Image (spheres, coloured by chain):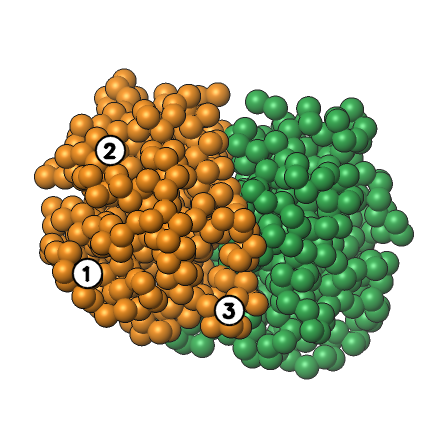
Chain colours: A orange, B green
Amino acid sequence: MERVACIGASMTQFGQREGEWVRDLLAEAGEACLDDAGVHPDAVEHLYVSNMASGEFEGQTGVPNALAHDLACMPAYTARIDQTSSSGGAGIYAAWQSVASGASDMTMLVGGEKMTHRSTAEATDVIASLTHPVEYKHGVTLPSFAGLTARLYLSTYDAPRESLARVAVKNHQNGVDNPHAQFRKEVDLDTVMESPIVADPLRLYDFCPITDGSAALMFCPESVAKEYTDEYAVVSGIGGATDTHVVHERADPTTMRGVVESSDIAYEMAGLGPEDVDVAELHDMFTILEFLQSEDLGFFEKGEGWKAVDAGKTDRDGELPINTSGGLKSKGHPLGASGVAQAYEIYQQVLGGAGKRQVDADVGLACNVGGFGNCVTTTILERETA
Amino acid sequence: MERVACIGASMTQFGQREGEWVRDLLAEAGEACLDDAGVHPDAVEHLYVSNMASGEFEGQTGVPNALAHDLACMPAYTARIDQTSSSGGAGIYAAWQSVASGASDMTMLVGGEKMTHRSTAEATDVIASLTHPVEYKHGVTLPSFAGLTARLYLSTYDAPRESLARVAVKNHQNGVDNPHAQFRKEVDLDTVMESPIVADPLRLYDFCPITDGSAALMFCPESVAKEYTDEYAVVSGIGGATDTHVVHERADPTTMRGVVESSDIAYEMAGLGPEDVDVAELHDMFTILEFLQSEDLGFFEKGEGWKAVDAGKTDRDGELPINTSGGLKSKGHPLGASGVAQAYEIYQQVLGGAGKRQVDADVGLACNVGGFGNCVTTTILERETA
């Protein structure tokens, strides 16, 4: 079977996009992706939209059809892929499958979400609707899970609270050099450690913001890619997996089984291991999640992710740079866009287009987490030349 | 590339399922499908959920993760596929791609929607949110489009109003023998013709009801199918396509381009034409749509679908039985389930499991329409023996 290539990528400014709606953002990213790939709208055969909740946020559904219309991609087939906060990663998997199955020779994926017109409480409630009804009824939200998990991790692995704060400090540092990031400002350790408590022990700066934004990727068979460009990325590995829907049923809540299982599939498909990864984008919706993923992906031993951050190993100039984009923490987290934007960063890194954020990388990995690890996709991209 | 087989199917009772929620319905259909296919939950690698609007209808998202949990399918990958009223067909396409791409050797698709706890006005409004904002703002709903289109069709092709009513009469006749149908009662021509006007010239009995229900299908590579059964269905053709999102931009609103384009793809893949189809399930959300699809699929000449119905050609004992299940009209239309339930009927027909509804069929076709033809999927199933 022919490999699937990625030949173009785009993302909009992330942040507060007042007066615009999800279809405006999707159209902006989609148009930029067509331009970047040098693909005419007529050539697009499948068009997927990663979006969790345009109906709940805006009262607008049927968004993929609107996008096919706005980009003049008709009669391209289109559908929406929702996997809550990992809708973007699920969209990559859908797009990959559409090409790998032979159903489409040119598939565009556009992920996006418009959230900031709703209050933080309203947006948090829409997101919390993904939890098990029993959890939801008791007032559990994703931030509260994060607080409980952080407390357990810190005590189990004897990690200092400051290590969590260092994730925020690092990702904010990276975000400064990302022109698309919502926050482009450094924060110091004291600022994080003294910010208001949200879900003890986690504080305001341990959380990603609520964000509007969109990102897009163009996929095709490798043989088609060569008609468009001399240098492209190949999806050498991809996998997805679930963990329990009810978080308290997990034997060890500091391990995300979805990350372990999905990366096992992706590594096997790519014929690679964690030691081969040069750069990674992890789903740092909360600082604690970066520790868990960096361990469950096999980058570091269990309980030692915090030591790696403390030692600067995941800094931009470290041995394994993590979240060079600024991560969800400083780049922002427009649900349906986030997984796509992670892959956008990896695409830029392996092809040398990351500007000031550029690191030395041939192989990159993106890990997109839905819910509180309820479903995870892992994608590996590698540079390839025609 | 190996062909994709369907080795199991199920559907719940369609109708008003008071006190149950979409996850209850999905779990019921999913469990029945596992049983029907003889597949252990552990063997399921991908699990797709076709659902348009659980968030809008119930305030519940993350439904695929709930289902993976309830069916004990973890760590199977899961995601939700939404293509409004054709979410079921889009789910079939996603499931097909997952197997054809090699990503999964056993994929279950479960479609469902819980709607009847909301008023007709509320449900109609959720559905209308799929229209273009300009249309929505002017109060356009899908029933009003149907009225306009019916009027145009009747005048363009000099068809009598009674022909539309005969679609309802025929489909209600078929529904009597479908134990899962919402309405199991015959209606006569006068009853349809004298029912209250909803969107002139269409009357109450020209419309499908609002429905709760779920349906499921199990897909795997043909080589795997042979380990489970001696007789199965093969997805010999499948395709999807969009039409304009803004209905008034269509050159001829009596032609559904999405139906034409998606069936072209499906016929070409199957190496078949409309003349080879023995039985079909069409998306009769409104009676007028059955005429349009029967023509745009190539079964009858443009403007002659009504003559075929009048002549009894689409009756159960006619030359091309259409909607032997009772169609959306009498079986009901739980949005995310409908496309899956169409394929359920075709699966039963080609494998001889349709009971009193059984017709002589080796090749069957299902056409699932999203929005007002905004996106359409066409699926062809054929009987195969190991």
Q: Nearer the viewer, residue A214 or A157?
A: A157
Q: Nearer the viewer, residue B67 or B94?
A: B67
For the residues beneath circles 3 and 1, the answer to whether they share a chain is yes
Under mark 3, the amino acid is Tyr
**How many C-alpha atoms fall within 10 Å of the one at disc 3: few (<14), some, or many (≥20)?**
some
Going by the picture, which residue comes out furthest to the top? A386
Q: Which labelled disc corresponds to residue A192?
A: 1
For the residues beneath circles 3 and 2, the answer to whether they share a chain is yes
Residue located 75% across and 27% down the image: B227
Whether residue B284 is situated above or below residue B46 in the rendered picture: below
Residue A304 drawn at (x, y percent) = 33, 40
Marks 3 and 2, how far apart at CA? 37 Å
Q: Which residue is mark 2?
A: A320
Under mark 1, the amino acid is Val
Residue B157 image-quadrant placement: bottom right
Residue A158 drawn at (x, y percent) = 33, 49
Any part of residue A154 in sight: yes
From the viewer's perspective, tell me whether residue B368 is left or right of residue A120. right
Marks 2 and 1, how far apart at CA? 23 Å
Under mark 2, the amino acid is Leu
